[in-house]
Amino acid sequence: MLKQYSQLMLLALVAADALAISAAWLLSYWLRFELLPAPKGVPALAERFLPILPVVVAAHLVLFHRFRLYRPRRSEGLFSETRDVVKAFVAAVLVIVLIDYAMPESSKISRQFVATYAIVGCTCFALFRFSVRLVLRELRRRGRNQRSAAIVGAGRSGQRLLHALRRSRWTGLNVAYFVDDRQEPEVVHGVPVRGPLARLHEIVERDPVDAVFIALTADEAGRLEDVLEQLQWSMADVRLVPDLNPTFAMKPSVSELDGVPILALRQTPLYGWNAIVKRGFDLVVGTACLVVAALPMLVIALLIKLHDGGPVFYRQRRMGLDGQVFDLVKFRTMREQAEKDGPVWSRKEDPRRTPIGAFLRRTSLDELPNLFNVLAGHMSLVGPRPERPEFIAEFKRAIPNYMLRHKMKAGMTGYAQVRGLRGDTSLRKRIQHDVHYIRNWSLGLDIRILLQTLGGVWFSRHEA
């Protein structure tokens, strides 16, 4: 019954999508030719725009299917579907342009209309799907549209999954029972434990569920084939939860290569659309910051030059994304030849600083030239602060997961810095905050860190 209900919901969603596309098409016509001025005249709706509408709707629905907009998304984040909708709609608009290009001259639609439809249609459709998702989530929170689940394995992975599902009530997945070989206790976190694993098929047949999550421990991995064989007669959806220590997995994702599933454990979150968004944000905001900071930077440069006549800028080798080394540009805050005997870790009240350098370090104004690194693509506005290769060779052996911080482009400021971890503070805590930032990266988090930086870090008295 639940499967049939899901199919009805899918058909209703496809029909609603078709209606939404048609409505956006007609609304775009009204906006372009009725509301806005049309110097070349108003083309007939029935003669030019309605005949092509079925083809447009069909193209959208096919692309929505190809972009997996009709698959179950119970366990996905709220904005993942909106992201896929935007990508699918952009592809659909490109198809419309190609279709229009192939049409005879008398049947072509205007480019202004296509541009209007791209903006109006994408916005309206994204809001429509977002609203549907919100309504479904609220219904599931209130106990409607629920699904039952069983977890095979009551160990660490199984219990972690149970807590995740309980925290995410919007999925509508309720754990009915565990299946495990353990004898005691018979209840784990309020959920009964049934067994043994050798009788899994009997347990699922006697008490059917909609989904089975296989969450065996690493020691039980050899039993996976037997578990899958026992579930081959069940109608439940089967999902695998690998027993991975969170310390060694950063934003894990699953891909497929010629039918072979591949689990990525460590990769940067900045790929595809994410990389474009972050780079665009860096260019726009970085340019604006450079324009605003141009006069203060000129004044600082003059003060440094007038003090001792030495160079204004100081270049230092730092390591960034994927271990690539670049020259970090800062205002010089120390006397010349301060490191003639080799790299030295900076410390509080460093005697090598110049008077103007002490002020620049205290206010972090010495880092303003980092904006040139941002615009050049070596750094980002927000990210883990880059370190010197000489120190990294030592830290990576002494501090667990130190190299994970290089899966994100280095930043002028970062999550660790706005949490007060600057200068001569705990490296281990800095790494924990850097990894937390990478695992939870979003554009909103970058904006929040920048605002906190402007409001606090530049006026703190910690050493850079």
Image (tube, rainbow, N blue to C red):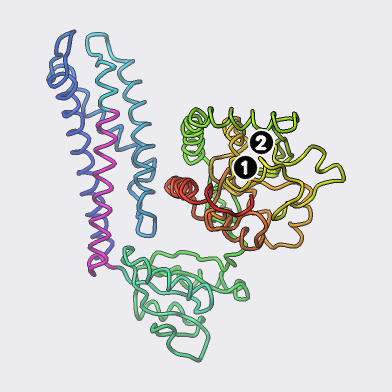
Q: Amino acid at mark 1?
A: Leu
Residue 8 falls left or right of residue 314: left
Q: Secondary structure at mark 2?
A: strand
Chief SS of the magenta region = helix
84 w.r.t. 143: above or below:
above
Q: Amino acid at mark 2?
A: Phe
Q: Comparing marks 1 and 2, which lies closer to the viewer?
A: 1
| The residue stretch that appears in magenta | 118-146
Q: Are marks 1 and 2 in contact (CB under 8 Å)?
A: yes
* Quadrant of the frame with the N terminus: bottom left
| Residue wearing tag 1 | 360
Q: Position of residue 149 (x, y in %)?
A: 37, 72
- Residue 93 on image: x %, y %: 33, 27
Q: Is residue 269 above or below residue 114?
A: below
Does residue 276 belong to the magenta stretch? no
Which mark is on residue 331?
A: 2
